[in-house]
Image (spheres, rainbow, N blue to C red):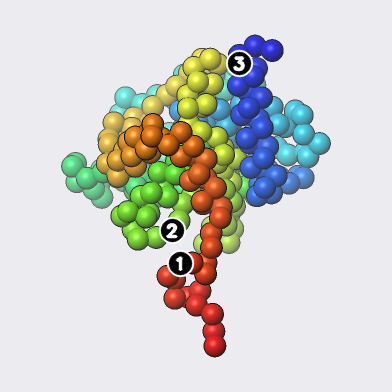
Amino acid sequence: MTETEQLEKRLLSHIGKAIADFKLISEGDRILVGVSGGKDSHTLLYLLRKLQQRSPVKFDFLALKLDGGQPGHSVALLEEYLRAEGYAYHILHENTFEIIQQKLKEEQNKCFLCARLRRGIFYRFAREKGFNKIALGHHLDDLIETFLMNLFFEGATATMPALLHSKDGHNVVIRPLCYVPEALIVEFARQKKFPIVSCGDCGEQNNHRRKWAKTLTDTLAREIPTLRQSLLAAMGNIKPGHLLDKRLKPQP
């Protein structure tokens, strides 16, 4: 077995465990896969197709790329790749860049608003086209960074869930890569030579809190090699009786 095949096997093991633990995919699912052109969504798309080919559970998926109209950002390379690889895909053109420019000042970070707009567009497309789930490429390090950001900046014990029901009750978001360390994705994308496409304007900005959380995680991991595994376990091992949330106080 080659190094790439071994790595693929590890990734499939992680994603398979997440799907089993949280029941992310069921028979007959129609899944909309958010594809940015980055390493994470490329890896997610590749692994979902492998699972589709091997799993007894039958499901369909469509790769959806949102072209937000950012200057200098082209979807041509990604579209060429998706077509050559035989993926079912759709390119959705929505000028979110103009909306962001109108609402935010130049020095303000655009990532948060961009993500909200993108999420709303994905929700709408999924409802209109009959997709019952939306798969996103967030990995373990994304969950850990969000967990730390919530702890240190928001005063909350929370992260990105593996399975999320939208507030309107019409959409279900799944994160099959939630157990996968980012380092494995980086190496897999390098070995598979995925055509990486940055998101343009937003990708040039620094999300300072997330960058801080990533640096903190990397720094601590050098001292504590099992840090990521411990934080993953902590996010799934909540002990309400040992916290201070008054809503969890036993009633007399």
Residue beneath disc 3 = 4
Judging from the image, what secondary structure is the residue with disc 2 in? loop
Name which of mark 2 and mark 1 comes first in the sequence.
Answer: 2
| Front residue of this view, candidates 100 and 59 | 59
**In this rendering, is residue 63 above or below 77?**
below
- Gap between marks 3 and 1 measured at Cα: 43 Å
- Tell me which residue sits at (48%, 27%) in the image: 183
Q: How crowded is mark 1: few (under 14 residues within 10 Å), some or many (20 or more)?
A: few
Q: Disc 3 or disc 1, which is closer to the eye?
A: 1
Residue type of the residue flagged with mark 3? Thr
Do the CB atoms of the residues marked 2 and 1 lie less than 8 Å apart?
Answer: yes
Residue 180 occupies quadrant: top right
On the picture, is 98 further left or further right than 81?
A: left
Residue type of the residue flagged with mark 1? Leu
Q: Is residue 54 visible?
A: yes
On the picture, is 78 further left or further right than 48?
A: left
Residue type of the residue flagged with mark 2? Thr
On the picture, is 70 further left or further right than 250?
A: left
- Gap between marks 2 and 3 measured at Cα: 37 Å
**Residue 95, numbered label:** none
Q: Disc 2 or disc 1, which is closer to the eye?
A: 1
- Gap between marks 2 and 1 measured at Cα: 10 Å
- Tell me which residue sits at (60%, 16%) in the image: 4
Q: Position of residue 75 (x, y in %)?
A: 44, 25
Residue beneath disc 2 = 157
| Front residue of this view, candidates 138 and 168 | 138
Residue 155 occupies quadrant: bottom left
On the picture, is 33 further left or further right than 221?
A: right
Residue beneath disc 1 = 243
Q: Residues within 10 Å of mark 2 (few under 14, many from 20)?
A: some
